[in-house]
Amino acid sequence: MNAAARSAPLQRYDVARIRADFPVLSTTVRGKRLAFLDTAASAQRPLAVIEAVDRYERSSHANVHRGVYQLSQKATDAFEGARTRVQRFLNAASERECIFTRGTTEAINLVAQSWARSRLGPGDEILITWMEHHANIVPWQMVCQQTGATLKVAPIDRNGELRLDAFEALLSPRTRLVAFTLVSNALGTVLPAARIIAAARRAGALVLVDAAQAVPHQKVDVQALDCDFLAFSAHKLYGPTGIGVLWGREAVLRDMPPWQGGGDMILTVSFECTTYNTLPYKFEAGTPNISGAIGLAAAIDYLEGLGIERVHAHEQALLRQATAALTAIPGLTIVGQAAHKAAVISFTLDGVHPHDLGTILDAEGVAVRAGHHCAMPVMEFFDVAATVRASFGCYSDEADLAQLVAALGHAREVFG
Ligand code: 7TS
């Protein structure tokens, strides 16, 4: 085979072949083809992930870090191999910086309860944006109550963009932490991370990046970003539920107290004095989600095998088509019109409650999310109770979009 022929399959994004990797996509819903447009809530899993977990469960399971016997060593190698895979995925300086958590939510709570709770007090400020998922709001509210620190919120505009001028004006020497989402789950907005982080640094604040909606769509490099913490969940990245990652800069993590006590996070325990384990184990109390970590590593392999840039280009093409098609529907309003968006479209349809619309779409085999998307302040800002949200992934195709548009036409007929 010559070089051109070898590289040929890489040139073409074969969405039909990719769809075949996801067993659920060939199932039907109420006798209709499934148009799965809720990837932002949780992505479907490819066979590569399902089989990696299955292989582990069948042949390699034992508790990790404890056994002297071969099976336990095999499980430990697989688990720690998954950590190394995460380290390369994020371009982290070391595996010690990659902590397994239950997901993004737990990762952010870890930073709130370990870093923030042990350091902040009255007069200190945490700055977030109006676009955050509840997971990047509530843990900060809780720690502000515990410490007397203050939560500040940078406003957005009618397009769903962060108002950078207002954000920068809210920064001051009192700002100890800036926590923001790289991509809004409710609006699709891609935030200007470089500018936000540079401004936070000038103010002397640490930076936490919520990358839950970013890692499936764009290359995320923690060293290039120059942040201090970054969180994501495997299940939005074509991996299993119940597993995610907190990446933290080693020098910062080293000085943080543990937040949960138990097995694995200790070196020695006596009733007089307990000493804590080194990184990353200091933050991983109890038996971890071993099969989840293995599934996550397989999901990273899968996505990188497709090429994140190529997935991104495919999703952006679909987003452009979807934006044009939905804009043409009378009475439909797209909520969130930022210049840079990930493959998420939130919308409302005049005269139809989003929940009713979601139910009608479901009857047509179209799976979308209807609700506040755990971003109630965003709904309040746009003065809507809820939206319908269609979101795309590597396997989404034009047939999904056509099915959505046809179902929306049907909904308009039903509601006159
Ligand atoms: N941050 C963002 C930006 C999110 O989109 C989500 C989940 C989370 C944090 C929390 O992630 P978890 O895995 O810990 O739950 N977002 C959504 C969503 O948009 N629909 O369902 C879950």
Image (cartoon, rainbow, N blue to C red):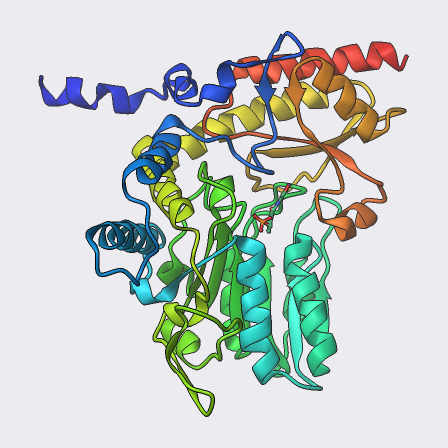
Q: Position of residue 134 (x, y in %)?
A: 69, 55
At 89% from the left and 15% from the top, the residue drawn is 415
Name the residue rendered at 73%, 51% in the picture.
157
Residue 258, compared with residue 19, is above or below; it is: below
Along the line of sight, the residue nearer the viewer: 221 or 330: 221
In the image, residue 415 sits, relative to residue 222, either above or below, namely above
Total labels: the figure holds 0
Q: Position of residue 145 (x, y in %)?
A: 74, 76
Q: Residue 225's spot in the image, x, y percent? A: 42, 60
Side (left or right) of 248 relative to 361? left
Name the residue furthest bottom. Answer: 272
Q: Is residue 199 visible from the viewing direction of this image?
A: no
Please give the name of the residue rendered at 42% of the width and 65% of the height, measured from the top-left corner: 226
Quadrant (top left, top right, bottom left, bottom right) of the C terminus: top right
Image vertical order of residue 248 relative to residue 300, above or below: below
Q: Position of residue 372 (x, y in %)?
A: 76, 42
- 148 and 387: which is toward the camera: 148
Left or right of 290: which side holds 373? Answer: right
Q: Quadrant of residue 358?
A: top right
Quarter of the image where the N terminus is located:
top left
The answer to whether residue 50 is left or right of residue 416 is: left
Is residue 215 among what the camera can see? yes
In this view, the residue farthest toward the top is: 31
- Who is closer to the viewer here, 55 or 206? 55
Q: Is residue 152 above or below residue 336?
A: below
Residue occupying image coordinates x 68% and y 57%: 163
